[in-house]
Image: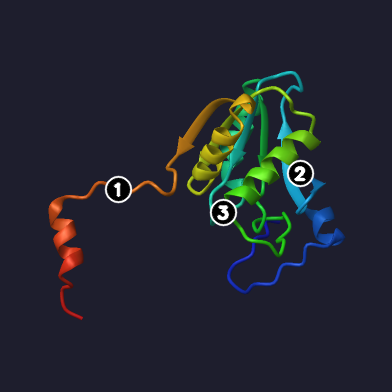
Amino acid sequence: MRRYRFRSEPLALDDAARASAPGQFVRLSDGWTHYELAGPPDAQTVVLIHGFSVPYYIWDPTFAALAEAGFRALRYDLYGRGFSDRPDVEYNADLYDRQLCELLDALGIATPVDVAGLSMGGPIAIHFADRHPERVRRLVLVDPAGFPLKQPPVAALIRLYPLGE
């Protein structure tokens, strides 16, 4: 069963919910983080960071393919998503950076990793790579959030002059 919070939908993340969840949990400084790790322990680790609206299971096909190809695949739920805790803190780049650093440390992953970020996971991956270049071997961005689209000049005119009501 997949759980995620939508608007005001309550989601109790208690021991019973964690017991029914796939994957594993680790307690970090800001709360519990839900994750899944597959593949040979000595293989190159690929970290998969999901976007805003869909938790870690968005990576299901990629996660399975990486593990089958001999990589060590790690995916996790960002704080506030999926089965990870929803700490009462400011949700910003520092929080997500700390979460990933602590997760890698807790799992004993000390070698540089390949990091893939999808949508909102893109800026998180960029921030992590910028702050910790020694921990990142490669960076992959999949439709990253935060990059403005190039628009034709007519689009700018439409934004300036509203068309009707």
Q: Give the mark nearest the N terminus, 2 or 1.
A: 2
Rendered image: mark on residue 149: 1
User: What kind of residue is marked 1?
Assistant: Leu
Q: Quadrant of residue 23?
A: top right
Task: Describe the element under mark 3 as helix, strand or loop.
Answer: loop
Marks 2/1: CA–CA distance: 36 Å
Residue tagged 2 = 23
Mark 3: few, some, or many residues within 10 Å (few <14, many ≥20)? some
| Residue located 80% across and 60% down the image | 17
The residues tagged by marks 2 and 3 sit, at their Cα atoms, a distance apart of 16 Å
Q: Is residue 15 above or below residue 57?
A: below
- In the image, residue 149 sits, relative to residue 142, either above or below, namely below
* Among the 4 quarters of the image, the one containing residue 163: bottom left
The residue depicted at 65 percent of the width and 23 percent of the height is 112
Q: Earlier in the sequence, mark 1 or mark 3?
A: 3
Please provide percent x and percent y for residue 72: 69, 26
Measured Cα–Cα span from mark 1 to mark 3: 22 Å
- Disc number at residue 55? none
Q: Are marks 2 and 1 in contact (CB under 8 Å)?
A: no
Across the whole image, how many numbered discs are drawn on residues?
3
At label 2, the amino acid type is Gly
Q: Earlier in the sequence, mark 2 or mark 3?
A: 2
Left or right of 162: which side holds 99?
A: right
The residue shown at (66%, 21%) is 44
Question: Residue 142: percent from the left, percent from the top?
Answer: 46, 39
Q: Secondary structure at mark 1?
A: loop
Give the residue number, with chain letter if any, for mark 3.
54
